[in-house]
Amino acid sequence: MRKVTRSTRGRTRRRAGLALAAFALLASCGGGQLNESSGGVYAPGPSGEPDVDGLIIGHRLMEAGEYELALRAYTRAATEDGLTIDTLSAMGSANLRLGRLNQAEEILRRAVEEDATFPPAWNNLGVILMERGEVAEAAEAFRRAYATDNGNSDQIRDNLRLALARRDAALYAEPQENEEFQLVRRGQGDYLILAPL
């Protein structure tokens, strides 16, 4: 028969305490949510707490230059909220920054069909068309963006001015290659994209 000593009882209690703590920790993590700001680590979320909006996460990732991750966040937002004008415009802008002009153009054309009064979608479509060298159509897209925005955006005005100058200069001389066109989105901030060399 094994003799139970005070030290054996202490070890048994410590082990039981550690097992209970580990069990409680696992139980609290069971319904966790992906915490985007902590590098993809799962963290417990209290019930009833709203999830972070995928569009907001995507906008922050765009500002940080993480375009592929932003596209994933926008895609996740589209699966939750549907293909709204905001998600379409955001996905098109992320594809544009990734150099995927075909996908970006297709998505942004769908966005302006969905809502022809959304200035960022028209503007960003204009940026794609300028990248493709379709200056006249780009100028028309910028004109629509400027009109639907009631002339409130300096970035859109500048894009329209540059597109019109390039369109008119194309008849007489080579276009200037050192000017910038600007992406815009709903909310604060803007994204710059350089004109092609």
Image (cartoon, helix red, strand yellow):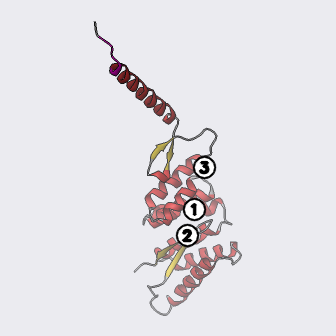
Do tag 2 and tag 1 residues touch (Cβ < 8 Å)? yes
Nearer to the camera, 21 or 171: 21
Crowding at dot 1, Cα within 10 Å, few <14 / some 14-19 / many 20+, comes out as many
- Can you give x and y, in whole percent of width and height, for residue 138 in the image? 55, 76
Q: How far apart are the alpha carbons under marks 2 and 1?
A: 8 Å
- Can you give x and y, in whole percent of width and height, for residue 66 in the image? 44, 62
Q: Quadrant of residue 122?
A: bottom right
> In the displayed structure, would residue 52 be above or below residue 4?
below
Q: Is residue 10 visible?
A: yes
Secondary structure of the residue carrying tag 2 is: helix
> Is 51 situated left or right of 95 in this image?
right
Q: Is residue 171 magenta?
A: no
Q: Quadrant of the C terminus?
A: bottom left
Q: Which residue is mark 2?
A: 124
Q: Which residue is mark 1?
A: 89
Q: Which residues are magenta?
A: 3-7
Q: Quadrant of residue 101?
A: bottom left
Secondary structure of the residue carrying tag 3 is: loop
Residue under the point 62% across and 46% down: 50
Amino acid at dot 1: Ser
Residue under the point 53% across and 75% down: 182
